[in-house]
Image (tube, helix red, strand yellow):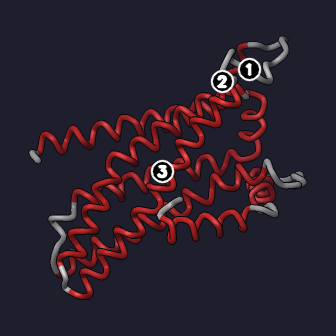
């Protein structure tokens, strides 16, 4: 693979990731923009599309995003464990296997971000009232999620493109540390959105207080930890599924 090919393979996922973040920023700004543009008129609460229905369309895109996200979260665990075993035993086959696992992430990661951006766009378009309500509650966690997404993206490409340059000695140890960071950021990228989903399925009273107090009350709901434990087990045992 030439340097030019590598550059193009980086730019394509990076462009998709940038688009996803712009869409997320649009979701944060959307309530204020709607209020400014349609002041004095009733706000649209729900939109539908003929034949397929907005609920079905959102479900299809969300399911595809979740399946890809499970793959993206599960594969780095296997890759990192294989690399650690290869490093400890000196068996290069494990290191090669870990690299082949990681190679799958460069395309699947970008595709996951693409479907995530499409899902966000659909939710804002079809459920504006719901998204306004969730944004008002979870605004701090949205910013935290953006930061985690940027950190994971940077770590992933350092981990993948630094593989051949970090094969011996302290460089290898640092590369293994990058793999640990990749899984660390992925863990929090998993549990933060779980709070948004479980909040909608759990009886939670949002008390008055600061933005951080309100988001923590919404996050610490009765089903948040059970869902997180299930997702962790699924990622480790079943590779995300």
Query: In front here: 172 or 71?
Result: 71
User: Are circles 1 and 3 on residues that touch, CB within 8 Å?
Assistant: no
Mark 1 and mark 2: span between their CA atoms?
A: 7 Å
Residue identifier under label 2 = 125
Residue identifier under label 1 = 47
Q: Residue at x 74, y 33 (%)?
A: 132
Point out the tag, 1 or 2, that comes first from the N-terminus: 1
Residue 227: percent from left, percent from top: 69, 63
Mark 1 and mark 3: span between their CA atoms?
A: 29 Å
Residue 28: percent from left, percent from top: 63, 35
Residue identifier under label 3 = 149
Classify residue 177 as left or right of residue 227.
Answer: left
User: Are circles 1 and 2 on residues that touch, CB within 8 Å?
Assistant: yes
Q: Residue at x 80, y 23 (%)?
A: 45
Residue 32 visible to the viewer: no
Mark 3 and mark 2: span between their CA atoms?
A: 23 Å
Give the answer, above or below, for where 12 lies relative to 40. Answer: below
């Amino acid at each position: 693979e030439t340097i030019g090919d590598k550059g193009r393979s980086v730019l394509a996922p990076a462009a998709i990731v940038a688009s996803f973040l712009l869409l997320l920023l649009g979701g944060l700004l959307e309530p204020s923009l709607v209020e400014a543009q349609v002041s004095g008129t009733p706000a649209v609460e729900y939109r539908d599309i003929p034949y397929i229905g907005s609920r079905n369309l959102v479900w299809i895109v969300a399911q595809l995003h979740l399946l890809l996200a499970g793959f993206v979260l599960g594969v780095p665990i296997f890759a990192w464990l294989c690399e650690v075993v290869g490093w400890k035993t000196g068996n290069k086959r494990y290191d090669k296997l870990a690299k082949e696992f990681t190679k799958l992430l460069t395309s699947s990661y970008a595709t996951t971000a693409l479907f995530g951006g499409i899902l966000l766009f659909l939710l804002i378009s079809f459920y504006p009232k719901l998204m306004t309500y969730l944004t008002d509650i979870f605004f701090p966690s949205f910013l935290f999620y953006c930061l985690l997404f940027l950190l994971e993206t940077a770590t992933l490409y350092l981990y993948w493109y630094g593989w051949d340059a970090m094969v011996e000695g302290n460089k290898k140890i640092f590369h293994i540390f990058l793999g640990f960071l990749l899984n660390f950021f992925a863990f929090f990228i998993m549990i933060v959105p779980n709070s948004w989903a479980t909040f909608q399925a759990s009886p939670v009273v949002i008390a008055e207080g600061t933005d951080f107090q309100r988001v923590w009350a919404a996050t610490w709901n009765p089903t948040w930890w059970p869902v997180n434990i299930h997702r962790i087990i699924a990622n480790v045992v079943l590779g995300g599924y």
